[in-house]
Image (spheres, rainbow, N blue to C red):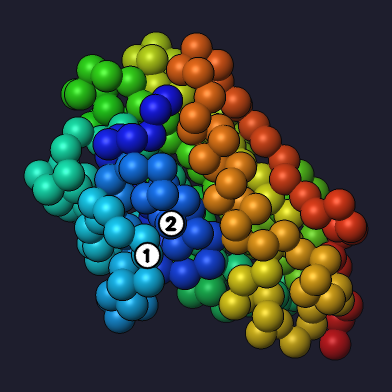
Amino acid sequence: MNLTESVCVVTGAARGIGIAIAADLLKRGAAVCLADLDEAALATAIELLPEGKRLAVVCDVTCGESVANVVRQCEAELGPLRVWINNAGMARHRWIPDYTEAEIDQMLNVNLKGTIMGSQAALRAMIAGKSGGHIVNIISTASLRGIPSETVYCAAKWGVRGFTQGLAEEAAAHSIRVTALLPGGVATDFWAGASDRQAPMELFLQPTHVSAATVQCLEMDDFCVPRELVLRSLKDSDFSVKPS
């Protein structure tokens, strides 16, 4: 895909991986809609980005109407949707006996339901546009293995990976590509503030590594579908945590 003038939506775009992806897309001439729940952070982020066609929309990815509103505003102001990147997510270190039901619901809703709602809205718009498109789901290597203290997060990410595989089969009938991108540990604010982190931050990927991989997948020839890409630091081991 030629990203110049292509209309792209990035969820969870106010910080970390999301803002890095938005910046790289703008550098390639794409029109970018940044969607995030944090309105203040979103306003700050959009001022930090390179010049170009950009739009900020407050969005709760767990709410179908909120996600649909992103599509409406994006297409009204920027044009037909070509790329949707499901990046919004959350993580929490907690041992299973210590979770509340509300915390479990939140983890599953943001990570799994949020990806499903974003993909559904994007697929509807792309099918209506009849010009193909590309959906990228930023998942995690937590979808490949179980990790102590990240058990519910792993459950959500395994669900996202399974959903993405099915989505790819459905979307292909409409010439829409779907990619699952599975990064290992990434040096974001979440990990920087984690008291039980067992590995130094210099061993983690940077958000720019994930954004570069995302753009590379998008820029492949439309005939080629990068279905799943695992991205890990050369020095990455399983970043486990120990019970307190």
Q: Which residue is drawn at 86% across and 81% down?
A: 243
Is residue 159 visible in the rendered image? The answer is no
Q: Which amino acid does label 1 sit on?
A: Leu
Q: Are marks 1 and 2 in contact (CB under 8 Å)?
A: yes
Query: Residue 157: x percent and y percent?
Result: 62, 50
In the depicted structure, whether residue 174 falls above or below residue 89: above
Mark number displayed over residue 23: 2
Label total for image: 2
Q: What residue type is labelled 2?
A: Ala
Query: Residue 18: x percent and y percent?
Result: 47, 59
Image check: 16 left or right of 64?
Answer: right
Q: Residue at x 55, y 20 (%)?
A: 225
Q: Which residue is drawn at 49% across and 32% down?
A: 218
In the depicted structure, whether residue 41 falls above or below residue 1: below
Tell me the quadrant of the picture where the N terminus can be found.
top left
Mark number displayed over residue 49: 1
Between the C-alphas of marks 1 and 2, the distance is 6 Å
In the depicted structure, whether residue 163 falls above or below residue 196: above
Tell me the quadrant of the picture where the C terminus can be found.
bottom right
